[in-house]
Amino acid sequence: MKFFIVSDTHDNIDAVKRFLDVLKSSFISSGFLIHLGDIVSPFTLKLISESLPPKFNLKVVLGNNDGDKVLLSRIAKEVYDQPEEADLCGLKAFLLHGFKSVELTEKIAYGVACGGYYDVVLYGHTHRFKIEKIRNSYLINPGTLSGYLASRKTYGIIDCEDLTASITDLESGERILSTKIAAGR
């Protein structure tokens, strides 16, 4: 089982289609896609929802630039305001997009990670990819799939088989960051 994690697609349809091609070519029989917000328009979520491989589930945490939240929630079954909780590979996870500035978002994510209740804290909003261990938690930001305000289009993967978290460059396929993760308790 793999959890693919994206954030900040910002209606970049070309990047979304390329990412969906990556999912289809990964030959994974089942998995999850977690979108950490700033999809922006319902047509982008519709494309994602309708193009996922058959046994993939989709979970969306809405961001500050997501427009028609009512319509977005009608397109996919699991669309939530932030924050949200999830079980990822048996790990307790906290999911959020972000709030106001990059600095405030990072403070909130770090604060949640420092609390030690969650094994994994996933967040977006900053357009900066990151994997960092904070005490017994792992702080993971997949960066931005759109590439806007960043030097790369990136996404994250949590692999349940070997309990690794990684960040991959969409354009080159290069794995930029990778680390083993484990429950903090």
Image (cartoon, grey):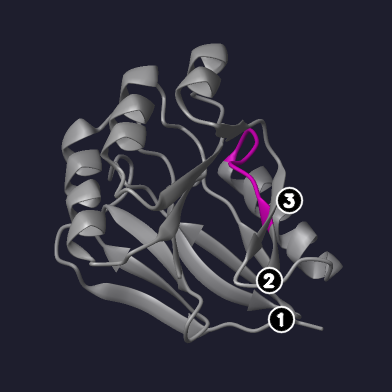
Observer-side mark, 3 or 1, equals: 1
Which SS does the magenta portion mostly show?
loop
- Vertical placement of residue 96 versus 142, above or below: above
Report the side of 107 relative to 160 (left or right): right
Give the residues in magenta. Answer: 94-101
Q: Nearer the viewer, residue 61 or 141?
A: 61
> Would residue 66 be seen by someone viewing this image from the given angle?
yes
- In primary-sequence order, the first of circles 2 and 1 is 2
Query: Alpha-carbon distance for marks 2 and 3?
Result: 20 Å
Provide the residue designation for mark 1.
183
Quarter-of-image position of residue 117: bottom right
The kind of residue tagged 2 is Leu
Q: Secondary structure at mark 1?
A: loop
Dot 2 and dot 1 residues touching (CB under 8 Å): yes
- Vertical placement of residue 105 versus 32, above or below: above
Observer-side mark, 2 or 3, equals: 2
